Image: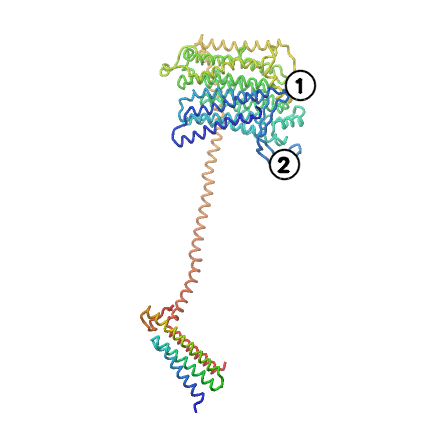
């Protein structure tokens, strides 16, 4: 099975090629788009095959001994170059293979990507059903995304990973801007792309630094090199820290961390399945994956770990506060995603890599489900996203209600559901790990309470309370078709149970962490002193965080079901604070003021420079050329041509004189003979010559 | 006594008549006839010297000249006929095809 590993990304690529090319051909030939059953069979079929292969590969992988669970496949040589001297003075050949690597970490990623991805593809059949002309375009982009994401997680070196990294950015751009007639969608797509470029800039510098220090970009070799060159953590701020920091800059862009998170809420302009797949479940976790993959580097750069943890938990806090006051259902989920990604980075920052990846997986389930559920609501209300115009939808959309309810309880951290286990693992690690800090734990618990509050608020505003529907849509609100609700149900089951893979220590074995361990464990310092706390401490902390989550749920119930008037009273009382948070701390406006408008000014200046100075220079030189050409043309006509003509005229005139001699009369010629002969003879006779 | 001087005078006279005929007459046929006169003046000259010098080579030359003259007359008359059939004239003033 493992020898077919390369097929996993190739299958969606084929789907992309078939749907894209056939679709374009059909449109150009007949003017009508390709038939929908063909398009979605190809798209969903290719992803389903990839999922089956991923399951097969995963199955083969767990048959192996835990320490042999790393399979590398080099497909072809991609780049070869000359020898380069590395920073350590060795010669290294630039030789990069297009290689793939399957280990526990990438196995988890491909299962999540293909599994959740397949369900979202199926859901999209229903969601996109109204769209006639763009149907094939949508599915081919989705397949392109799957290909790029799988390339990203299956690569065995930084450069191929970077290809996938850029590729998911591209497909994200294409899909955010999918509604090509909406200006806001195009703007959001541009914003996402540009902000991601800033992060990618850091990432590519980090790759260059890695190559210049280790002479290779291959994961295994780089991490071995890290161990050899930097046996102990870098306490001073040195090259390894810079590499780690620049990689994290890349992760900040892709995974929407402060200060580069601003693109993700705007990315909700795309169709909801795109938000679910790319901007919640998979692509935005690429940064988490990359940092987890590079844990060999991070574990030796304690200062950067502190930065990662700090930015992660700060992002979690800021995004959670913004999410509490949003009115657009998808914006709530977007900020919630940013907040949960912050949790993951906080986990990575405290050295709990497995916990971070675990939260990544559970989050993929419940956040994809939440987005798909919100999509179901949005479709039922004919593309209404404002929660102020919803309410009481529970009786119209029962399946959507209970599936989203499970996801909400999961993200809120209700015991027994997946989010509880993963979030609690992160909180516990931030408390107990040597790199952790009590402050991170406090903020983390606070954010857990806020998460419970804003998610329940969203549920109450959408499904409970009185109906605030617009009259024109109120009559025909109905549950979505099965093709959309079945993926919801499957994801609901997943959201409920995947948590049991990673039980806390006081409940049972943590299968998930144990499985992932070989992928990072060797890189962490063996000498590290791990505090051993009693199980009772962990239970106590868990009880504390669950209590806070319960409080969050109760407050939401209090404000949005029982005493609705109280919430308006509080808003009035703290109008200034509310305005600040409601407007997302004016971060977009600040960025506009500081960077975007400055960039526009620079652009305008350069444009003026171009049209005045550069164009003037070009036009001036053109004028000079024209004048000199005119002069040399005149010289040609009046001097050179004159000389040539004069010579010809001289010949013509002299020949006209000589021509007269040749009369054509033979007798005249004979006369000349005779005269000549007489002259010759006379000379002979009289001069005696 | 008729000596070589008489022969030479005669041949000079005949040759001069031939030259004047070639230069002054307009009719091609008469020009050809004048050329024959010049050739025969030369023959006379050759034979006179042959007799005078007691050498037969002059007479052999004369026979050659007569032969060549016959051939020349044949070719010349052929040209005249061809010319006439093209231009319908034998007047040399009108035959100036080689005028520059």
Q: What is the number of the mark on residue A91?
A: none
Q: Chain of mark 1?
A: A
Residue A643 x/y as whole percent? 44, 60
Disc 2, SS: strand
Q: Where residue A396 sits: x, y (%)?
A: 41, 12
Residue A455 in view (yes/no): yes
Q: Camera-side residue: A490 or A474? A: A490
Most foreground residue, A514 or A173: A514
Q: Which residue is mark 2?
A: A83
- Disc 2: CA contacts within 10 A as few (<14), some (14-19) or many (>=20): few
* Quadrant in which the C terminus of chain B is drawn: bottom left
Q: Quick check: A685 above or below A479?
A: below
Residue occupied by mark 1: A528
Q: Where, by quadrant of the figure, is residue A297 drawn?
A: top right
Rendered position, A44 above or below B62: above
| Image quadrant in which you'd find residue A508 | top right
- Can residue A450 be seen here? no
Residue A559 on image: x %, y %: 46, 10
Q: Residues within 10 Å of mark 1 (few under 14, many from 20)?
A: few
């Amino acid at each position: 099975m493992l020898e077919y590993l390369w097929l996993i990304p190739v299958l969606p690529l084929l789907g992309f090629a078939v749907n894209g090319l056939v679709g374009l051909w059909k449109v150009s030939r007949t003017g009508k788009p390709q038939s929908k059953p063909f398009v979605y069979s190809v798209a969903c079929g290719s992803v389903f095959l990839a999922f089956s292969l991923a399951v097969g590969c995963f199955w083969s992988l767990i048959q192996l001994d835990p320490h042999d669970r790393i399979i590398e496949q080099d497909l072809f040589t991609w780049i070869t170059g000359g020898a380069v001297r590395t920073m350590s003075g060795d010669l290294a050949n630039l030789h990069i293979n297009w290689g793939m690597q399957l280990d526990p970490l990438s196995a988890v990623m491909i299962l999540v990507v293909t599994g959740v991805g397949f369900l979202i593809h199926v859901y999209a059949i229903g969601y996109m059903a109204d769209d006639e002309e763009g149907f094939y375009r949508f599915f081919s982009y989705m397949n392109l995304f799957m290909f790029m994401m799988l390339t990203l997680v299956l690569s065995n070196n930084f450069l191929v990973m970077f290809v996938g990294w850029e590729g998911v950015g591209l497909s994200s751009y294409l899909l955010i801007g999918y509604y090509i007639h909406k200006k806001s969608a195009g703007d959001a797509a541009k914003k996402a792309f540009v902000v991601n470029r800033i992060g990618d800039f850091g990432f590519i510098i980090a790759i260059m630094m890695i190559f210049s220090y280790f002479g290779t970009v291959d994961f295994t070799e780089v991490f071995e090199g890290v161990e050899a060159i930097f046996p102990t953590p870098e306490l001073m701020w040195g090259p390894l820290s810079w590499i780690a920091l620049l990689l994290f800059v890349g992760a900040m862009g892709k995974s929407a961390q402060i200060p580069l998170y601003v693109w993700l809420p705007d990315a909700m302009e795309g169709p909801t399945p795109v938000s679910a797949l790319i901007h919640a479940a998979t692509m935005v976790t690429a940064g988490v994956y990359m940092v987890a993959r590079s844990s060999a580097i991070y574990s030796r750069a304690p200062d950067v770990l502190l930065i990662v943890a700090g930015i992660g938990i700060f992002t979690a806090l800021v995004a959670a506060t913004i999410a509490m006051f949003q009115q657009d259902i998808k914006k709530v989920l977007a900020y919630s995603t940013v907040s949960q990604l912050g949790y993951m980075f906080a986990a990575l920052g405290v050295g709990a890599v497995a916990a971070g990846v675990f939260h990544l997986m559970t989050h993929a389930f419940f956040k994809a489900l939440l987005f798909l559920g919100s999509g179901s609501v949005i479709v039922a209300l004919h593309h209404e996203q404002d929660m102020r115009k919803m309410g009481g939808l529970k009786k119209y959309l029962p399946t959507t209600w209970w599936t989203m309810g499970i996801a909400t309880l999961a993200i809120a951290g209700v015991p027994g559901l997946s989010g509880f286990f993963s979030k609690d693992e992160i909180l516990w690690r931030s408390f107990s790990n040597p790199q952790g800090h009590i402050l991170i734990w406090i903020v983390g618990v606070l954010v857990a309470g806020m998460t419970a509050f804003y998610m329940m608020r969203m549920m109450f505003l959408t499904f409970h309370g009185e109906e605030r529907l617009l009259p024109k849509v109120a009559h025909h609100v109905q549950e979505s078709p099965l093709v959309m609700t079945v993926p919801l149900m499957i994801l609901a089951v997943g959201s409920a149970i995947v948590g049991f893979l990673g039980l806390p220590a006081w409940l049972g074995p943590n299968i998930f962490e144990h499985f992932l361990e070989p992928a990072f464990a060797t890189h962490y310092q063996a000498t590290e002193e791990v505090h051993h706390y009693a199980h009772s401490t962990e239970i106590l902390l868990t009880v504390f965080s669950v209590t806070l989550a319960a409080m969050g749920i109760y407050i939401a119930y209090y404000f949005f079901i029982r005493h609705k008037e109280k919430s308006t009273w509080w808003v009035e009382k703290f109008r200034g604070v509310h305005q600040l948070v409601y407007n997302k701390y004016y971060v977009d406006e600040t960025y506009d003021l500081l960077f975007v408008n400055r960039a526009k000014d620079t652009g305008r200046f350069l444009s003026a420079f171009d049209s005045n100075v550069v164009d003037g220079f070009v036009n001036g030189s053109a004028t000079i050329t024209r004048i000199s050409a005119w002069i040399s043309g005149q010289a040609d006509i009046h001097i050179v041509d004159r000389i040539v003509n004069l010579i010809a005229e001289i010949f013509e005139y002299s020949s006209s004189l000589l021509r007269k001699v040749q009369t054509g009369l033979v007798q005249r010629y004979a006369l000349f003979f005779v005269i000549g002969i007489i002259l010759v003879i006379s000379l002979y006779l009289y001069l005696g010559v | 006594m008729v000596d070589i001087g008489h022969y030479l005078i005669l041949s000079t006279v005949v040759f001069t008549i031939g030259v004047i005929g070639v230069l002054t007459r307009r009719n091609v046929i008469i020009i050809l006839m004048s050329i024959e006169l010049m050739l025969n003046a030369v023959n006379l000259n050759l034979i006179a010297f042959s007799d005078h010098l007691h050498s037969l080579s002059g007479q052999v030359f004369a026979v050659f000249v007569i032969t060549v003259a016959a051939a020349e007359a044949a070719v010349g008359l052929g040209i005249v006929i061809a010319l006439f059939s093209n231009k319908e004239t034998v007047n040399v003033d009108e035959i100036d095809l080689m005028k520059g």
